[in-house]
């Protein structure tokens, strides 16, 4: 069949032109549809790759948690109560015989009784002690570290081997200042941690009146 318009049909040329334009339009539409489908596939893929890249970057750039390798460990068994004064081997103590009444958790401006504080350690508390001459801004740092924590005791302590000492039952860490990142790591690990002889026991309704 010839594409040459039939001289006997004056409208043949116009129809041929329209058919050519329609064919061209359909071809263009098919091309656009292919591009749209490619975009539909490509955009979610790019988004997924972007999210994956962002997550990977977060993990790669995340700082290493501070090491707690310097924590000293001991081997005291809980449940040994006595109303007598106790001479402890560690300073401050991290376990051993203790008063039947625990110390209420919180912030204290004066030294607290060892025997009551050790009972709080048995309940899962972390006891942060500091030398009485620690600068006020350092004490404020320690107060901020325990703010909102219900199982922590903060108090000054005479004769510490280091400016700040953190104690949990059978675990102790000495640090030089209140800015040490290991303080946060110690709290995260040991406040009501796996070392607790009496998990779930109270750190309130005992003895002592914290100031904060």
Image: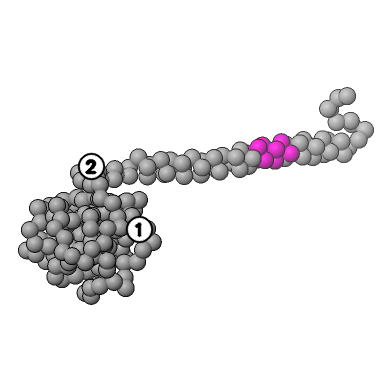
Is residue 34 located in the magenta-colored stretch of the structure?
A: yes
* 158 left or right of 19 in image: left
Give the camera-side residue of 7 and 70: 70
Main SS, magenta region, reads helix
Q: Is residue 210 above or below residue 41?
A: below
* 8 left or right of 135 in image: right
> Image quadrant of residue 206?
bottom left
Q: Where is residue 57 in the image (x, y as percent from the top left)?
A: 38, 42
Is residue 29 located in the magenta-colored stretch of the structure?
A: yes
**Which residue is the site of mark 1?**
198
* 38 left or right of 81 in image: right
**Which residue is the site of mark 2?**
69
Q: In this view, does 44 lie above or below 130?
A: above
Q: In which quarter of the image is the N terminus?
A: top right
Q: How far apart are marks 1 and 2 (CA)?
A: 25 Å
Q: Residue 120 carries which label?
A: none
């Amino acid at each position: 069949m010839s594409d040459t318009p039939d001289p006997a049909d004056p409208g043949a040329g116009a129809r041929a032109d329209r058919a050519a334009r329609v064919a061209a339009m359909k071809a263009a539409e098919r091309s656009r549809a292919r591009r749209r489908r490619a975009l539909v596939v490509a955009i979610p893929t790019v988004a997924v790759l972007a999210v994956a890249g962002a997550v990977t970057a977060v993990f790669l750039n995340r700082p290493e948690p501070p090491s707690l390798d310097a924590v000293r460990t001991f081997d005291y068994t809980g449940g040994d109560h006595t109303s007598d004064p106790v001479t402890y081997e560690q300073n401050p103590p991290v376990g051993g015989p203790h008063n039947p009444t625990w110390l209420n958790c919180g912030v204290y401006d004066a030294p607290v009784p060892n025997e009551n504080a050790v009972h709080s350690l048995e309940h899962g508390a972390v006891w942060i002690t500091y030398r009485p001459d620690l600068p006020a801004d350092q004490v404020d740092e320690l107060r901020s570290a325990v703010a909102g924590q219900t199982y922590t005791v903060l108090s000054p302590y005479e004769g510490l081997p280091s400016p700040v000492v953190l104690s949990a039952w059978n675990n102790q860490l000495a640090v030089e200042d209140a800015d040490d990142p290991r303080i946060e790591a110690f709290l995260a690990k040991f406040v009501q941690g796996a070392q607790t002889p009496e998990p779930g026991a109270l750190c309130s309704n005992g003895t002592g009146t914290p100031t904060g």
